[in-house]
């Protein structure tokens, strides 16, 4: 029987989605009446990072891997009792598994891309010598983990291949939404967006961070080619982008696509309700990632009634199911043609696509996700 779950999260400097996941688990477990203790590294020396330049990341590492283990070991010693499970919510801290050897535990693996990069499997994302050493430590921790949950089948396959682990000690648990994304009334959504952008024209939405696998340049090129395929029409959709600045990419493409500078609108610091509005009023979501661990924007967009155009490979195909529209990111001309085809859909065709997206969400419910983790907790508690 599960008496308590210790959720081990990440520090403040980590990507937003990696902070959302333990918060989501904390809420869902408490709703089931299970005691929860959530801990994560405190940012102490990391506060000095802005003043020390490139070496600042090492201050965060000291907070995480030198100072935090004292807290972690103290909590584990105090909570070591029947029914207590430790859950390391981010595999990038898998080297901390050594502190969990005497307690039933599980690690959630979100993706294996940095480890694959460090092993030379992804040439477009070269890794420094120190980065290779760091990723090896993470891989060694994953090999020692008692049980590993993976957020997609693609991640699970990479995990088993690179760790040589047993399939019996891993399971796929698909993520659920991390916010109550639902279709916002169109008038309300457009009013919110107009207030932010001073723009009332239709738009294509791109949601992504600055990581290489988000394929930001590819998204820009697909959009630019879409506009050119639509030359001669009276109106064109803009591109609204949420994430870090795209100035470098737009500047490097200015000679070939000068129209980008005046047609790409960036929004920063977008809160979930604004993002809900953006999804709800968009013509479609363009999400041409080279790779992902899961791909939350796919189901976020579908939950808001937004048609999704994404990459024709896993895990995007696993997440989007038969409700998304797939493109080859290596073929921007073909991707642009697909987008024009979708922009020209009839109202009935659009409505059918939206309904299929909403139906796809049943696979990503909070209930299914938390029951998956409760099943894993019971499994690790029953192991010697």
Image (cartoon, helix red, strand yellow):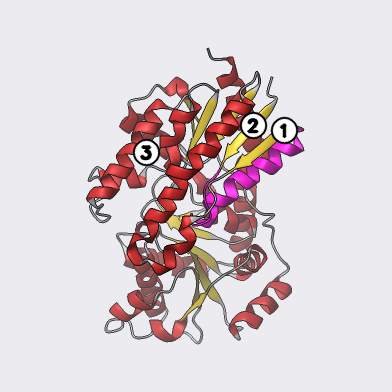
Tag 3 and tag 1, C-beta contact below 8 Å: no
- Element type at marker 2? strand
Q: Is residue 128 left or right of residue 353?
A: left
Q: CA distance from mark 3 to mark 1?
A: 29 Å
Tag 1 and tag 2, C-beta contact below 8 Å: yes
Badge 2 or badge 3: first in the primary sequence = 2
Mark drawn on residue 330: none
Badge 1 or badge 2: first in the primary sequence = 2
- Residue on which the image places disc 1: 35
Residue nearest the viewer, comparing 308 with 247: 247
Q: What is the residue that sits farthest to the top in this orientation?
A: 384
Residue 327 visible in the picture: no
Part of the protein shown in magenta: 9-33
- Residue on which the image places disc 2: 5
Residue, x 63% and y 41% (percent of image)?
38
- Residue on which the image places disc 3: 138
| Residue 321 location (% of width, % of height) | 51, 45
Crowd class of label 3 (few under 14; some 14 to 19; many from 20; radius 10 Å) = many
Q: Is residue 350 left or right of residue 152?
A: right
Q: Quadrant of residue 50?
A: bottom left
């Amino acid at each position: 029987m599960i008496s308590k779950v210790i959720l081990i999260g990440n520090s403040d400097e980590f990507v937003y989605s990696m902070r959302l996941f333990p918060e989501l688990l904390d809420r869902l477990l408490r709703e089931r009446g299970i005691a929860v203790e959530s801990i994560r590294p405190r940012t102490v020396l990391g506060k000095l990072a802005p003043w020390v330049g490139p070496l600042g990341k090492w201050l965060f590492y000291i907070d995480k891997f030198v100072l935090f283990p004292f807290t972690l070991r103290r909590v584990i010693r105090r909570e070591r009792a029947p029914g207590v499970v430790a859950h390391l919510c981010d595999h990038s801290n898998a080297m901390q598994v050594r502190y969990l050897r005497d307690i039933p535990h599980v690690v959630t693996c979100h993706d294996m891309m940095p480890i694959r990069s460090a092993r030379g499997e992804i040439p477009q994302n070269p890794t420094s010598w120190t980065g290779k050493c760091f990723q090896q430590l993470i891989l060694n921790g994953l090999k020692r983990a008692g049980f590993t949950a993976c957020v997609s089948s693609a991640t699970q396959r990479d995990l088993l291949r690179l760790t040589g682990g047993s399939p019996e000690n891993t399971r796929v648990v698909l993520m659920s939404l991390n916010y109550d994304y639902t279709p916002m009334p169109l008038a309300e959504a457009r009013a919110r967006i107009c207030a932010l952008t001073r723009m009332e024209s239709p738009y294509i939405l791109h949601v992504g961070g600055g990581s290489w696998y988000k394929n930001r340049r590819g998204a820009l090129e697909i959009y630019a080619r879409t506009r050119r395929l639509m030359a001669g029409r009276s109106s064109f959709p803009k591109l609204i982008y949420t994430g870090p600045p795209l100035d470098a990419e737009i500047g490097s493409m200015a000679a070939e696509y000068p129209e980008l500078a005046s047609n790409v609108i960036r929004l920063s610091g977008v809160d979930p309700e604004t993002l809900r509005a953006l999804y709800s009023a968009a013509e479609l979501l363009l999400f041409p990632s080279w790779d992902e661990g899961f791909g939350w924007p796919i189901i976020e967009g579908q939950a808001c009634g937004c048609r999704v155009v994404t990459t024709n490979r896993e895990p995007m195909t696993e997440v989007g199911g038969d409700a998304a529209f797939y493109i080859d990111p290596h073929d921007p001309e073909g991707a642009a043609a697909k987008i024009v085809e979708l922009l020209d859909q009839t109202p009935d065709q659009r409505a059918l696509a939206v309904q299929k997206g909403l139906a796809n969400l049943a696979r990503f419910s909070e209930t299914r996700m938390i029951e998956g983790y409760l099943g894993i907790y019971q499994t690790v508690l029953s192991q010697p």
